[in-house]
Image (tube, rainbow, N blue to C red):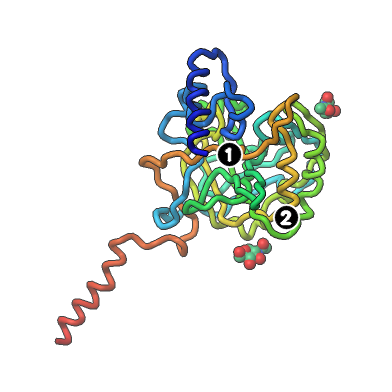
Amino acid sequence: MELLFLVLLSLHIAKTATAGDKEWCYLSQLRTQPECTVPHFWDEVNEECGKEKQSPINIVTNKVEYKEDLKPFTFEGYTTDQSSLWLIENNGHTVKVSLSGSAKIGGGGLQNKYNAIEFHFHWGTKLNKGFSPGSEHTIDGERYAMELHIVHRKESFSTTEQAVANQEGLAVLGFFIKTGAKNEKYEPLIEMLNEVGFKGSQKNMTSLPLESLIPDKKNLTRYYRYSGSLTTPNCYQAVVWTVFQEPIILSESQVENFLKLYFSKDKPLPMTDNFRPVQPLGDRIVYHSDVSVVQPPAKALLVVPTLIYILSLLFQ
Ligand SMILES: *[C@@H]1O[C@H](CO)[C@@H](O)[C@H](O)[C@H]1NC(C)=O
Ligand SMILES: *[C@@H]1O[C@H](CO)[C@@H](O)[C@H](O)[C@H]1NC(C)=O
Ligand SMILES: [Zn+2]
């Protein structure tokens, strides 16, 4: 298997040396599109992808730091069924829903308000032996079944081009999706997946309250925060990332509906494993909003033994 991979990879390198404009792709597309650029080489698509503050990352829970500023978010326009239509599309990398309503977020330690502009998903694959998960972020190395990204743009910007030129131009909310009971609230969205099977297909759909797609607000006070990037080319390092601890629950058969989409227009190649591998954290710090789950710093741990030692001297 590894040998096969190496052969494919060297074929890929040989080809890319001569190819001109190449499309970027996920590793799962390499078998049928040997000329495409897999994540390891995305810096050839845009040099930004090779820089030092890239996403996703693995979050190591005993290294995160508590940050008091990370208060609960305020969600505006998340509860209302916006009367506008949503545009759902298969863009050849994911299923993406463009928003035209007025949903926005504030609080959450953000310096500004951010408007919701689109959401999309990342997922894994199904093998004979079971599901292989496909979230982008991992927690202590563990990957969830899927991940939802709701992309928000700083209120003061009117285009994404402006926002990506700013270090905090975008705020992405990341939600893990875990398998469990069927989630009725996702049915209207999942039914639309049939309509956008192939790359380039688009459909209008009745909008839903965004709140119906995420866990209860009460459970969104525990989250991780770090500075990173878009997880697809051009990998702009313009994202304030929030990764919530509480997952969304979907049933296995609901997750399977995403696996029925295709990367392609003509040759039907199932859209699977559309996640980028985790990137080096470098000298960044991941913060957490919840003091109770964060390990006390090493110095605080020393206080107790020191006190006991002093007391033992007194009572000798
Ligand atoms: C969606 O609706 C808008 C406005 O009604 C229309 O202009 C557009 O063509 C529709 N798009 C699709 C893909 O049906
Ligand atoms: C919030 O999370 C807790 C623990 O994970 C769970 O027991 C509870 O049902 C959740 N509440 C809601 C409203 O989802
Ligand atoms: Zn994403």
Q: Is residue 74 visible?
A: no
Q: Amino acid at mark 2?
A: Ser
Residue at image coords 52%, 39%: 1
Specify the farthest residue to the bottom. 316
Q: Is residue 46 left or right of residue 275?
A: left
Could you classify mark 1 by the number of other residues whose Cα lies within 10 Å: few (under 14), some (14-19), or many (20 or more)?
Answer: many
Tell me residue 148's x, y (percent).
Answer: 64, 44
Pointer 1 residue Cβ closer than 8 Å to ligand 3: no
Answer yes or no: do the residues labelled 2 and 1 have beta carbons within 8 Å? no
Residue 22 appears at what percent x and percent y? 57, 18
| Relative to 93, residue 292 above or below | below
Which residue corresponds to mark 2?
A: 251
Q: For the residue with label 2, is its CB less than 8 Å from the closest atom of ligand 2? A: no
Q: CA distance from mark 2 to mark 1?
A: 20 Å
Q: Nearer the viewer, residue 216 or 155?
A: 216
Q: Residue at x 20, y 77 (%)?
A: 309
Residue type at mark 1: give it: Phe
Q: Position of residue 24 (x, y in %)?
A: 57, 25
Q: Position of residue 268 (x, y in %)?
A: 73, 30
Position of the C terminus by quadrant: bottom left
Question: Could you tell me which secondary element the residue under label 1 belongs to?
Answer: loop
Query: What residue would you read off at disc 1?
Result: 275
The foreground one among 167 and 54 is: 54
* First in sequence: mark 2 vs mark 1: 2
Label 2 residue SS: loop
